[in-house]
Image (cartoon, rainbow, N blue to C red):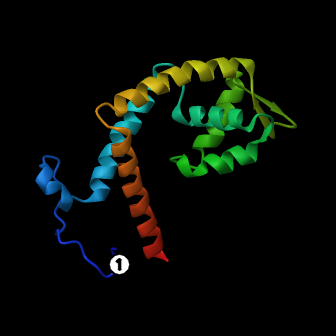
Amino acid sequence: MTTKTQLTATPAAPADPAATDEMLPSQPIGYWSGVAHRAVIGHIRDAMARVDVTQPQWWTLNRVQRAGGPLPRETVLADLAEFAESPHEVPRAVDQLIHRGWLDSYGNGELLTVSDTGREAIERIRELVTGLRAEIHEGITDEEYVAALRVLRRMADNVKAAAR
């Protein structure tokens, strides 16, 4: 078992986009997680833009639909805040979806539900997202994917623990 005082045997090296597999243990996670993030999010957002939807709008539609009934606007904003790149991204998505008619609002705009038009849009977008997931996961087994996420989750937990 690894302890806080145990160091890795591999010294850190500067980021190298051309690093071989043998060099990967020394590569900085911050660089490579950033590369993956930019590539994946850029691909998803570009594909969604081609069907005139944003990723925050997609998150919002899903969150409201999962509620199965009216959901307070503030709950949506709080639930999705950690995923947003700015504090304005999710409130803007809610307003855009109401304007588009994909969300209905009640009670002075404080309660949200997905409209019939919004449910139709969800089905169309879900097909796109399913195809994107297949592209992104090409050549990666479920076991590899789970292992990668476990490692990333553990790193995030390590950083949180170190910050205390």
Q: Is residue 82 above or below residue 133?
A: below
- Element type at mark 1: loop
**In front here: 80 or 154?**
154
Residue at image x 76%, y 34%? 68
The kind of residue tagged 1 is: Thr
In percent of width and height, residue 26 lies at 18, 62
In percent of width and height, residue 130 lies at 47, 26
Q: What count of labels does the image hold?
A: 1
Q: Is residue 10 left or right of residue 108?
A: left
In this orientation, does residue 89 appear? yes
In percent of width and height, residue 152 lies at 39, 56
Q: Is residue 91 left or right of residue 149?
A: right
Q: Is residue 19 left or right of residue 34?
A: left
Read off the residue under disc 1.
3
Quadrant housing residue 118:
top right
Q: Is residue 32 above or below residue 142?
A: below
Q: Please, which residue is most extreme toward the bottom here?
A: 5
Q: Please, which residue is most extreme toward the right here?
A: 107
In percent of width and height, residue 99 lies at 70, 25
**In front here: 6 or 19?**
6
**In front here: 9 or 57?**
9
Q: Is residue 26 left or right of residue 110?
A: left
Q: Is residue 116 above or below residue 26?
A: above
In this orientation, does residue 52 appear? no
